Amino acid sequence: MGSVASRTSASKGTARRLLAFVVPYWWIYLGLGILILLDIGLDLLFAWFLERVTDAAVAGNAAEVWRMLGIGIGALLAIVVVRYLRAYSVSVASSWVKRDIRNALMQHVLRLPTSSFEARHSGDLVSRFSNDMNALEGAVGRTVLQLVSGPLAALAASIYLLRLNWQLAILCLLLGPLILLQGAVFGRALRTNSQRLQSLLGTVNAFLTEVFGGHVVIKAFAMERGIFHRYTRDNDDLSALEVRNGRLRAGLSAVTYALALLMFLLALGVGAVYVTNGLITVGGLIAFVNLLNRVVAPFGDLAHIWGSFQKSLAAADRVFQILDEPVELQELPVPQPAGRALEKGLTLERLTFSYDGGRNVLDGIDLHIPAGKITAIVGPSGAGKSTLFKLILGLYKPSSGSIRFDGVEIAAMAPSELRSLIAFVPQDPVLFQGTVFENIAYGRPGASREDVIRAARLANAHDFIAELPQGYYTEIGERGTRLSGGQKQRIAIARSILKDAPILLLDEATSALDSQSEAAVQSALDRLMVGRTTLVIAHRLSTVHNADFIVVLDEGKVVETGTHASLMATGGLYSELYELQFRPVAT
Ligand code: ATP
């Protein structure tokens, strides 16, 4: 009971929140309301026309027949226009409302903290943007309209039927509950089946994303048969659910049709007797039979439409769940020009951090990172190196302790100010849809062509970019797949060079490049590091050799600091790691 009650109130809340997006377009919805009333009125007018034209014909009144035909044709034309306007306006209204919700969603998602992204599968967010956004359409468009117009039309038609002949109307309307009941039974079964179908579709979509993303691994491990087998199994299930859906729909329409037919026969049979008794005219009976359909159809569909409406609300709920997540930024940040160079450096004081409030991933780190120097961070996997970067970038707040840039605590800085001080080069370069030029220019929006080319030259990227089909204006494929690993890294480096921030956070790539590409990337990085306060998660031998200062992290603690030579001399964790990770292999 409780869960039903809370679901209803959640639905109410959701409906109210949807209403907030609908209100700006109240005039279209008002227009739609008027169109619905017109539609109903015209239907009744048409029934009236049938009654009058038939009666006039039976009475042999040719003039009246002609007059009525004029009205009938007029009514038909008006119905066509109204139906067109109604279908068109509802598409416009729902697409505008959806556009506004999508914009609100995107604006919200872009302001969410890193923790929100790391807590969920990226596919989940994408599916809320696409599947759920599509599914919620019903709640602001066609479905909700049917929910209003169907019963209204049925009510208006029932009143007209009662007016035509109340005994006959009551006799027919007694079948109404039966129609409602079968609609409810089929509607419930259809809803459960559709939910299963939707959820399986979601699983299959996620599976497909993995398959296409991991095609190299699939080939390398000859996983094709297994993947195909799994796909065919899901596909069979999908098809079975679709067939069941089809069967239910067919059942619903057949039973609705049978009941409608029954009503029709009843009306015609009893009505014919009434005609002979003079209780109803021939025209009245024809109008009656015609209008009956206006009662049967909406009631037969009502349960199903109600189910669709609930499904749309559930989808809207999933969208609003994202909108309810607390944001990190009050508004979308404006990129700021790079901050000035550091004078003293970065100071970490008793820095402690835990993701879940339990285990400390960083534990009481005290560290001074000197300005203008290269500091290498090394440590075993899971030591907390990447987490340290996330804290310096302000993506997570320390549980305790502080991070200061030249004595200013980063907690006191606006995120955009903090990030204007930092250029971040991740392990796996991230490129976005768009041209090579745009991808580099993200480093400094508004950068001139000369600036972008200069940065690309410094990043050893200019030559290969110039050889691309459209040079700097070549479109990069999804995740930059048309470029080699080393080329992508050099574009990412060019972006950071263009940003020209005083602090460089560099997470070196672990994947090996061929020696020529490696040399190009390395010299690009060397240029990028010049004059900056650099903190690098080191994976390369040359980096630890060239670093001014090395910090060894283990289980969230700084266990050693020093230069390569001094740390090797100590013979501690660093020298062990060095043997394992960095030592050049003798050939
Ligand atoms: P590697 O060299 O393997 O990349 P690392 O030193 O960079 O490792 P981190 O990625 O900082 O290590 O992870 C430190 C610890 O924090 C690990 O135990 C990891 O499981 C945990 N961790 C990392 N990210 C999260 C997260 N988003 N939520 C919860 N725990 C996390």
Image: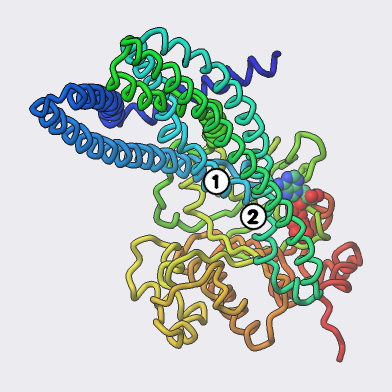
Q: Position of residue 271 (x, y in %)?
A: 40, 17
* 168 displayed left or right of 480: left
- The structure residue drawn at horizontal position 34% and vertical position 26%, both measured from the top left corner, is 23
| Amino acid type at mark 1 | Asn
Is the CB of the residue bearing disc 1 within 8 angstroms of ligand 1?
A: no
Q: Is label 2 in a helix, a strand or a loop?
A: helix
Could you say which quadrant of the image residue 547 lies in?
A: bottom right
Q: Which mark is residue 131?
A: 1
Residue at the left extreme, as displayed: 63
Q: Which residue is mark 2?
A: 205
Could you say which quadrant of the image residue 375 lies in?
A: bottom right
Q: Is label 1 in a helix, a strand or a loop?
A: helix
Residue at the front extreme, as displayed: 276
Q: Position of residue 143 (x, y in %)?
A: 45, 33
* In the image, residue 56 above or below residue 528: above
- The structure residue drawn at horizontal position 27% and vertical position 32%, both measured from the top left corner, is 28
Residue in the foreground of this view, choosing between 524 and 470? 470
Q: Position of residue 145 (x, y in %)?
A: 40, 29
- Image quadrant occupied by the C terminus: bottom right
- How many numbered discs sit on the rendered protein? 2
- The structure residue drawn at horizontal position 59% and vertical position 64%, both measured from the top left corner, is 425
* In the image, residue 208 above or below residue 333: below
Residue in the foreground of this view, choosing between 95 and 573? 95
| Amino acid type at mark 2 | Asn
Q: How dense is the environment of label 2, judged by Cα within 10 Å: few (below 14), some, or many (20 and up)?
A: some
Pick whichever of labels 2 and 1 is earlier in the sequence: 1
Residue in the foreground of this view, choosing between 410 and 235? 235
- Image quadrant occupied by the N terminus: top right
